[in-house]
């Protein structure tokens, strides 16, 4: 179970109480599918915190690893499903996917490159009969898969645990609904599902279920797309975008804010990050920043064509989205973050440099939030992860001992270290000498 970031959620709660100037943000865009050796097009991207992206083309599922810049056609591997749509990617690089014809859900484990067809396992509750294939299963970092089983509007929601091969029924529990369809699972053993017409949040540890839509200030019904983050925050999509924040039990109706896109089209197929940022579709894909309550249109802008409904957002505010027939990754620009004055460095030069065998890396974070610090070799391959988690604002320091992921000393040469936080990325170079 991943611990909740109480400080960050409290700060976000305070931010939602005020409405500063709401300005659209600057993003840089990378066309992932048109990179060298890419498939040239893609649909339904899913992004993890490392910036890796899973998507599908035709009936093949692909995995793009950002650190190496390589593509892997998962469908070409032994044991892969014959057809794979709507891949869900976690931070271990594992993928859940659905066969659109058999409605079987498959699990791919990247470390072993093994595939598991859930339909072949004991106690499998049955295939889904739902038409909304992109919204009826999800994957957590603990390799738990929430899934719909049964008829379209009369099925149940279960959780499959890959560690022990078990299936746990989530619907028809005390306080919940006797049926459910759309569902999401987070990294704190919580499952959100649409129970016709309400949205329910079920805790696997306590076995308690809460009707989110019937809480004070809630919309009363929860039909439409739903999403969930690790803090237990919920977004409900129907004719509005409704953001429920678990800390404080408050609802924010995005349509009441200046800049909300004027469109008769209901919102659909969207995602919320652990810091409350939302990517949603409303005739175009938009980004919502909760810190200043601003909206930014992503598709149909600049190099990104219109078209495409699918989007996925990671904890660093990076958004994988469909633009036309391609998959793009939209990265918030450093200049979009008001807390980082122009020219200010948050990542400092390592000391000593050159070094052998170890060196210290210092940084200054402008605000608390999720942070990763990674070391790469000159070829762009990941050598070591030094930080991966929430850090407070201010100074920080970490030491690298010149060893790789397996604990073995790495050879002398040029290395790069990259610090990523919410809406910023900075990279510097260092030299390991013999």
Image: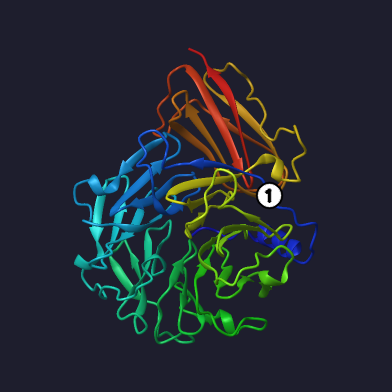
Residue 384 vertical position relative to residue 350 in the rendered view, above or below: below
Q: Residue at x 44, y 25 (%)?
A: 379
| Residue placed furthest toward the top | 434
Name the one closer to the observer, 405 or 258: 258
| Whole-percent x, y for residue 339 in the image | 76, 45
Displayed quadrant of residue 144 = bottom left
Displayed quadrant of residue 152 = bottom left
The reply to whether residue 274 is in sight is no
Q: Residue at x 33, y 58 (%)?
A: 85
The reply to whether residue 107 is in sight is yes
- Disc 1 crowd rating (10 Å Cα; few below 14, some 14-19, many 20+) is many
| Whole-percent x, y for residue 77 in the image | 23, 45
Name the one closer to the observer, 405 or 124: 124
| Whole-percent x, y for residue 277 in the image | 62, 58
Q: Which residue is mark 1?
A: 25
- Taking the image as shown, residue 133 lies to the left or right of residue 422, namely left
- Taking the image as shown, residue 22 lies to the left or right of residue 61, namely right
| Whole-percent x, y for residue 35 in the image | 42, 36
Name the one closer to the observer, 164 or 242: 242
Residue 77 vertical position relative to residue 309 in the rendered view, above or below: above
Residue 302 vertical position relative to residue 256 in the rendered view, above or below: above
Q: Residue at x 65, y 25 (%)?
A: 349
Residue 174 vertical position relative to residue 432 in the rendered view, above or below: below
């Amino acid at each position: 179970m991943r611990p909740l970031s109480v400080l960050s959620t409290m700060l976000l709660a305070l931010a939602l109480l005020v409405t500063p100037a709401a300005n659209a943000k600057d993003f840089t865009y990378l066309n992932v599918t048109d990179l060298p050796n890419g498939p040239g097009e893609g649909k339904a991207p899913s992004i993890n915190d490392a910036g890796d992206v899973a998507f599908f083309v035709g009936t093949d599922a692909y995995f793009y690893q950002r650190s190496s810049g390589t593509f892997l056609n998962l469908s070409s591997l032994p044991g892969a499903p014959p057809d794979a749509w709507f891949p869900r990617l976690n931070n271990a690089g594992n993928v859940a996917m659905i066969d659109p014809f058999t409605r079987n859900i498959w699990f791919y484990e990247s470390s072993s490159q093994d595939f598991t067809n859930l339909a072949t396992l004991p106690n499998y509750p049955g295939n889904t009969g739902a038409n909304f294939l992109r919204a009826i299963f999800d994957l957590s970092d603990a390799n738990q898969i929430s899934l719909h089983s049964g008829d379209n509007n009369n099925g149940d929601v279960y959780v499959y645990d890959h560690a022990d091969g078990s299936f746990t029924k989530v619907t028809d529990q005390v306080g919940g609904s006797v049926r459910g369809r759309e569902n999401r699972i987070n990294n704190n053993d919580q499952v959100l599902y649409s129970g016709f017409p309400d949205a329910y949040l079920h805790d696997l540890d306590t076995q308690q279920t809460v009707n989110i839509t019937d809480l004070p200030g809630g919309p009363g019904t929860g039909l439409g797309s739903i999403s969930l983050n690790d803090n237990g925050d919920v977004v409900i999509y129907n004719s509005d975008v409704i953001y429920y924040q678990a800390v404080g039990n408050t609802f924010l109706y995005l349509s009441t804010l200046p800049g909300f896109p004027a469109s008769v089209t209901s919102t659909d197929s969207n995602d919320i990050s652990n810091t409350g940022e939302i990517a949603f579709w409303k005739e175009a894909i938009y980004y919502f920043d909760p810190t200043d309550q601003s909206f930014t249109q992503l598709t149909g802008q600049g190099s990104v064509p219109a078209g495409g409904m699918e989007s996925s957002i990671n904890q660093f505010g990076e958004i994988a989205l469909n633009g036309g027939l391609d998959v793009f990754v939209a990265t918030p620009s450093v200049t979009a973050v008001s807390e980082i004055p122009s020219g200010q460095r948050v990542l400092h030069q390592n000391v000593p440099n050159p070094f052998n065998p170890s060196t210290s890396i210092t940084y200054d974070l402008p605000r608390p939030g999720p942070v990763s610090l990674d070391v790469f070799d000159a070829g762009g391959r990941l050598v070591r992860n030094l930080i991966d988690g929430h850090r407070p604002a201010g100074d920080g320091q970490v030491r690298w001992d010149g060893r790789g992921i397996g604990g073995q000393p790495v050879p002398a040469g040029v290395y790069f270290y990259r610090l990523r936080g919410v809406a910023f990325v900075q990279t510097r170079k260092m030299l390991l000498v013999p």
